Every structure is written in C-alpha cells, then in structure tokens.
Image (cartoon, coloured by chain):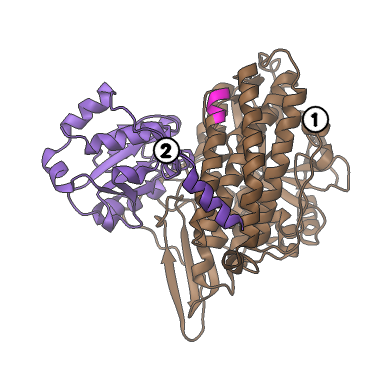
Chain colours: A brown, B purple
Amino acid sequence: MRGEADTRCRPWPRRAVDAPAWEAAAERLAEGQGTLLALWGEVGGVHMAVLDEAAAPGIEVLSLACPDGRFPSVGRVHAPAIRPERAMRDLFGLEPVGLPDPRPWLDHGRWGVAAPLSATPSARAAPDAAPAYPVLPVEGEDLHEVPVGPVHAGIIEPGHFRFTCDGETVVRLEERLGYVHKGIEERMRGADLDRAARLAARTSGDSTVAYGIAFARAAEAALGVAPPPRAVWLRALMAELERLANHLGDVGAICNDASFALMHAHCGILRERVLRAAMTCFGHRLMMDRVVPGGVACNLDAAGAAALRALVAEIAARFPRLADLYDRTASLLDRTVGTGIVRPDLARRFGAGGHVGRASGRAFDSRRALGGYPPYDALRFEVPVLEEGDVNARVWIRIREIEQSLALIGQILDRLPDGPVRVPLSPAAGEACEGLALAESFRGEVLVWLRLDAEGRVARCHLRDPSWFQWPLLEAAIEDNIIADFPLCNKSFNCSYSGHDL
Amino acid sequence: MPMRKTFLEGLLHRPLTDPPPALDDPELAELGRKLDAAARRRLGRSLAIREVDAGSCNGCELEIHALNNAFHDLERFGLRFVASPRHADVLLVTGPVTRNMREALERTWRATPDPKWVVAVGDCALDGGLFAGGYACVGGVSAVVPVDLHIRGCPPMPAQLLKGLLTLLAPP
C-alpha cells in the first residue's frame, strides 16, 4: 500500500491512496485477507477501515479522493460493501463504479432533497406516494410472496421484510431498511462535542453506553487527551451492565418467540433489576449521556457499589437455574437447535461481530482484539465462541456472556481506582484532528470515526453499527427455514434498525 | 426439574408488582380533563394499545417493553398491547417521525377505528428533539397525526408511561 500516512488520525493513521491501490485493497478483502470494518464517504472522498489482526497496526484506514464524485466499487467484488456503498450514494451522491445494485438504500425518495450530505444537495419533490422499489425477482412454480412491515406486530422497530415462500418454507428473504433514518450524521455536522455526544448516544438506544464510549474515545484520541482512570473503569462498569440488561432481555425474548413465556417473565425480572440498579447508581435506567468526552458525568458511591454487588449476587443465584431450564426444555430446544444457521465462512466474510459472529466461529471481540482497550486489557474474561451458528448457539453465547459480565462487574468493583472522573477537553491548537475508536456493545463492535475542526466542532462523524454486517446474514440464515421461525431467528440476531438506518 | 421449582417458587413468593402510580401530575391531570368524555365512555376501562416506532432510537421501545414485566404489569389495569392497529384504541407513537416513516404512521392511524387516542411518547415525539430541523425528520408526532397526550422523557421511565396511560382511563 503506497500513500502518504496522515498522522492527524489517531490512534490508527489514515492513508491516502490512489484508485489502483483502493481496488487492490478491495481485491484482498474479496480474497479473505482482512475484514471490512467500515466504509464511509464525505464530500469529495471515500474511506475504508480494514481490520487485519495478523498485521501491525491491526487497523488501516484508506482514503481515496474522488473529485469527480466516482470511486471504484468495493461491493463489486466484496458483497459486505454493497449496502454501505448504496448508503454513500444516497447520502453523498458518490457513485461506486461497478456496484452491482443500482437501487437506493436509505433514500426512500421522501427527503425532498437528493444527496443531502454532499456539497450541493439538490432539491427534489417529495412524492406523497411511495416511489417504486423493485425487490429482486424470484421465479419458480408455486412461490408466493409475504410482505411484512414496516409496522410490525410486536413492539419492535420498523423495517420491511419480503419473504418468498414455497409453502411454509422461505426460499428468499429480502430486507428493506432505512425507515428510521434520522439524518444523524448530518445533525452531527458543526455540532460541539457535547451535542455530538448526545446524538451519538441516541444512535441506538439499547447500545447508548457503547456509543458513548466509542464516541468519547474517538474524540479523546483526536484531541490527544486521556480520560482519568476512574472514568475508564466506570465506563466499563456501565458497559457491562448494559450488556447484562440486553442479553437478559434477549434470552427471555427469544424463548418468548418460541412461545415459552416463563423464561421471558423471569429474564424480564432480572433485566428490570439491572435497570433499577443503574437508576440508583447512575441516575438513568439506560445510563444515557453518562459517558461524555473527557470522562463520565456520574460517579459511584459506596451505596451504589453495594447495590451493584447485591445485583450481581442475585443474578448469579437465579440465572443458572434459568439457563438450566432452557437447556432441559425439549420443546424449546426443538425450536432453537438447527434453526437459522449462519455458516462460519459467511460470518467471517461479513466480519459479523457480537453473538452473531461468535455463535458462528468468529472470535472477534474489540474488548480483547488488538490488545483491547482500557480497562479490559487489565481484566480477566473469556470470549465464548461456538461453531454451530444456529439460534441455540446465539442463545448460549448470550448465556456465557452474562456469566462473564457478572464476573467483570465484580472485578471492576474490586479494583475501581479513586480520583477524578472527568477532565476538560479543549479544542486542538488551531488545527483539525481525527480519531477512530471501537467499543464493544452487546451486539458487537461499534466504530466511530470523527474529524474535529480547529474550533473543536464536528466536521464529519461516521458511526458504524455492528448491525450493518449482521442484517445481510439474517437473509441467509432464514433460507430453507419455515416462515413461522422468522421471529425466532430475527430475535436471536436482534440487529438494530436505528443504529443501521442512522 | 427446573421448571417445577420455578413454578413453585412463583407460587410461594410475594408478587413483585409495584403499587399503581399516584396520578398526581398536574400537567397530566389537565390533559386528562381535556380528553373527549364521550370517547372515554365508549372505550370504557380497557384499552388496546398499538405501538408505532416512527423513528425512535429504540430507547423508548425498551421502556415500553418494560411495562409488560412483573414489576409494572400493565395488564392489571386493563391495558394491553395488540398486534394490529385494527384492534387498537390507542396508538402509542415514538420517535421524531422520520420522513421515511411518515406514510406508515398515517396509514396506521387511518387503520385504527374511531374513537381513538394518540399518545406521543418521548422527547423526540414531542418536537423532534435532537433530530429536529434535519432533512430526514418531520419533527414531532403532532405534525402528522392529532396527538391527545404527550409523555415526555428520554426515554420516559415505565412509571411515567403508566401514569400517562392511566390518565386516559381516569374519570374526568
């Protein structure tokens, strides 16, 4: 890779490349060398973050200037890039040359503007009726289509699923997302760090702590500021509580989608206990806006620590029996074992993180990978990995991660350093700066890339939810399963609509 | 035998359910007085609720879900979530209403039979919140369908949601 290293981006430098080098990088991804971590645009250029754990420094960011608004498509050879490139075309008007899918992705023709993030957004009439969106053609005898959504039957986020079925069996699922596109990256532009952090925290509410950490770490890397040790440990404490709450909710909800309501009720009780403890300790049930650039906006007193120890003790006492109940209920296992299989090679190719990746043999966890980020580099924990890739495996990854999070919370409480919890952040000395950070949410790694201008305002911020590389695998997982098992498969993934749609 | 143990324990323990919230919020009481008394009479003391996410970050959905857990137990008040707007008396709408969800929200509202109430949940649903002013959001539920009640918060806690919903049932 030739190119000028741009050291303003920390801790991983960004490198400007030419079109042949960009294409060569795409070819290497297609050959299975490295993993596509993110692909995003800005006015006049495109960026790609590639993970290669075997080679230092582990993550490489490549940038290609495209003054004519065109760039060689990565999705042409590497399918995981297709949706990000469709989104870049919608938002920036950048044309991925050779991209096999000409359809828009986030742009449903409703914004009243085309390419809203480009230098010259063009006004466009927003039609009252939905513009046609051709789903991929499916041909064959006796096939029928089932359209579902965007408004679903349960209390879940909106998205459209088009099933093509042969009898009960799904022969193809096509997803259409973008319904909850809020324009977060546009709202970020020109925002001060405070406001930008609040926006990042609302990218996906269930991962608000993880987004807070990823955004804060990107900002701190950009400005060259280290948050105080106590803040770093408190962040991890909140992140593990968030993981615990979400996994407890998911284990219950997956069983509920197999009509086993007892598990749902009991997991719901434990989840509520976590949220109440978070409220007691940090003043917000979801711990929203508690992680801020420069540290944390809360502290933990002795009573709070005692409440968390009591919480850990209660869950540690009650949860094993629920796991046992899951494992011994044959009618439930009949639904989850062998259902919705994600093949390990697909999980690896798409770089799926979280329980989706780890249930299909991909061990990546950003708390551990590349040396891990503090304080996880100083904590003992295991990253559970299974190979089966079915709903059952995704349940078991969560069960194991609940156990690990309980142990982590205990370790953090034992070793929580004293001291201040926040340092002031001042804008860089008159020059733009960039930072890139990963933080492990309950569903996988959140990536934030941030460029601040000389006044410390956001020039461009890209937030990449782990769902981007999990949603496409759900389409593969449901193939040859019965349509009635879709809710079960979908819940076992639990991808974020909001985090993906931005 | 974990199932039998779990059932037995459930029988022997006291319920976890929280006491009903006190309806002492003057702002909500004022809204309650304004609600259509005729609709209130016709809908009685049991409401079917259809939730619509019109662009939320999913934080509101998490807390709406929590209404169903053993602590909040929404159904003891005659309130329950239904799968279709055609079965609903109340639309519980979250989010700043993205332009991409606008039509779906309008169609859901039209599919809900009269008399009906719309409850907007969360700070985004009030006026678009942090997302207001961008190209992608309409900004507030009331810009799209008539809203009877706002429950504020980011996200509102389950107790606040319960208070708001019980306002609909309280006698004027």
Q: Is residue A502 above or below residue B157?
A: below
Instruction: Provide the residue designation for mark 1.
Output: A7
Does residue A157 appear in this view? yes
Q: Is residue A160 above or below residue A374?
A: below
Q: How many marks?
A: 2
Q: Position of residue B15 (x, y in %)?
A: 44, 40
Residue at coordinates 49% horizontally, 47% vertically from top-left? B10
Judging from the image, mark 1 belongs to the subunit labelled A
Residue at coordinates 23% horizontally, 39% vertically from top-left? B169
Q: Is residue A169 left or right of residue B111?
A: right
Quadrant (top left/top right/bottom left/bottom right) for the C terminus of chain B: top left
Element at label 1: loop
Question: Dot 2, crowdedness within 10 Å: few (<14), some or many (≥20)?
Answer: few
Q: Is residue A278 magenta?
A: yes
Residue at coordinates 73% horizontally, 60% vertically from top-left? A360
Question: What is the span of residues highlighted in magenta in the rendered image?
Answer: A277-282
Q: Position of residue A279 (x, y in %)?
A: 53, 27
Q: Amino acid at mark 2?
A: Thr
Quadrant (top left/top right/bottom left/bottom right) for the N terminus of chain B: bottom right
Q: Position of residue B114 (x, y in %)?
A: 18, 51
In the picture, the disc for residue A285 is: none
Q: Is residue A67 above or below residue A255?
A: above
Within the image, what quadrant is residue B171 found in?
A: top left
Question: How far is the residue under mark 1 from the one under mark 2?
Answer: 57 Å
Q: Which of B3/B96 is in front?
A: B3
Q: Which of A7/B3 is in front?
A: B3
Q: Give the main secondary structure of the magenta stretch.
A: helix
In the picture, the disc for residue B17 is: 2
Q: Is residue A165 magenta?
A: no
Judging from the image, mark 2 belongs to the subunit labelled B
Q: Amino acid at mark 1?
A: Thr
